[in-house]
Amino acid sequence: MIRGMGSPASHPALEDLPLQWRSAPRRWGHSLHSLCSYFAMFPPQLAHFFVDWLTEPGDAVYDPFSGRGTLALEAVLQGRRSYASDANPLAVALSHAKTRVPSRQTLLKRLNELRASYSPEPVRTESEPEYISMLYSEMTFKQLVWLKEKLDRTNDVDCFWIAVILGMLHGNHNKNGEPRGFSISMPNTFAMAPGYVAKYIEEHDLKRPSVDVFEMLERRLERIDLPSAKRTGGRTWLQDATAQPPSWILKQRPKLIFTSPPYLEVIKYGKYNWVRLWFLGQTAAEVDQKLMASASLPRYLKFMESVSANLKEIVAEDGFVCFVIGDVRRGDTDLNLAQEVWEHVLKEQGWHLHGIIADELPQNQKVSRIWKHNSGRATKTDRLLLLSPQTRTLPDMVPPMWDRRLTFSGTPT
């Protein structure tokens, strides 16, 4: 654990807790966190703080809306048993790579096997969507189509390579014009609508970079801190958080469930990830149909009622649950959605509330600022609902030392 060596344990006021993770460097964290960008991701500093504070090595930690796997990775790095689920197959793919991390040697061996067995001649791309092929050169696209079919999602090594590819399917170019991903120059966090992208390509005469996918993957691997031996820290699975949880997770009794459920119709996760979902054999419409997205407060509260009821079955009796829920813009006012969830759902279910912690977000760090017409819906404040299934006191807190980071070797650097 990264703890303040020599610093006394304390019970700080809950409203002052954000000072703990906000005092960390903005880009603090393990290199695996940047494997692939993702909407509405909470910072690794936040996940690290709560795992370190509320659990001990060997405890189970669970995120039912795992996103890019931020909590999952922090749990693995701190020696916890890490469990992660999501209804979005993209989130599951990214989280899998961070709970079952292959060694560098194994990954490089597999990449060399794939490179040696690849031949462009038999690869057919005619049946692939034009809105995908318009992003890549012929050489690059053939390699991607071949890898899309070749990589085995039941294999941990291949799953890791899938996650790396997902993070590089689209990206911008550096100041020298060199691509950071495989595609024409585009943002790496999201993809605008296919029609918009097609028009932008034509208007700006964008050239599709002729890049070798295998070479770029090898270079990307060099920039990731990886274990010398496989690190199997937990398990990831596809699940709607309102559905009955699998029987085996009920036996794990996580000490901490830390998660950020969707807000009130802020983001369409499938719509803005149509390129990455193509590589997973999915469409944006298919994924968004399965995900919670509603502007109806009653419907949202009903959704949270199902989620929290399931989590109360799962969490350890002496455990904690923390929901990260942002304020949502409704007309000219900000709706304190976390307070609504507490008053109309969690209080009635008998949860013990330790507090609702306001965490002000710097506006220049919000991805949603890019939509000028939609910027009013961006939350300015995240609120953390810190709960226990029954009345109990919070443990002492030792301030983290942010000048050191955990590695897979277990040695802070």
Image: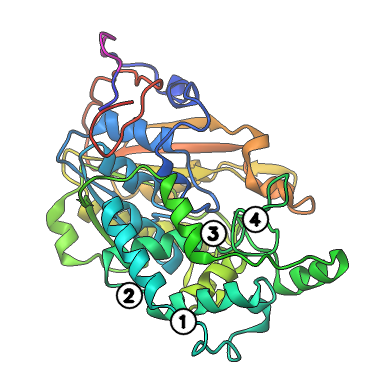
In the rendered structure, which disc, 1 or 3, sits on the residue that comes first in sequence? 1
Q: Quadrant of the N terminus?
A: top left
Front-lying residue, 141 or 370 = 141
Q: Quadrant of the C terminus?
A: top left
Say whether residue 282 is visible: yes
- The amino acid pointed to by label 2 is Asp
The span from disc 2 to disc 1 (Cα, nearest Å) is 18 Å
- The amino acid pointed to by label 1 is Ser
The span from disc 4 to disc 1 (Cα, nearest Å) is 24 Å
Q: Mark 1 sits on what residue?
A: 119
In the rendered structure, which disc, 4 or 3, sits on the residue that comes first in sequence? 3
Q: Residue at x 26, y 9 (%)?
A: 8
Please tell me how many numbered marks the rendered image carries.
4
Give me the disc on residue 168.
3
Q: CB of mark 4 within 8 Å of CB of mark 2?
A: no
CA neighbours of label 2 inside 10 A, class few (<14), some (14 to 19), many (20+): some
Extreme-front residue of the structure: 116
Q: Secondary structure at mark 3?
A: helix
Give the residues in magenta: 4-9
Q: Mark 4 sits on what residue?
A: 179
> Residue 363 appears at what percent x and percent y?
67, 35
Mark toward the viewer: 4 or 3: 4
Q: Mark 2 sits on what residue?
A: 152
In the rendered structure, which disc, 4 or 2, sits on the residue that comes first in sequence? 2
Q: Secondary structure at mark 2?
A: loop
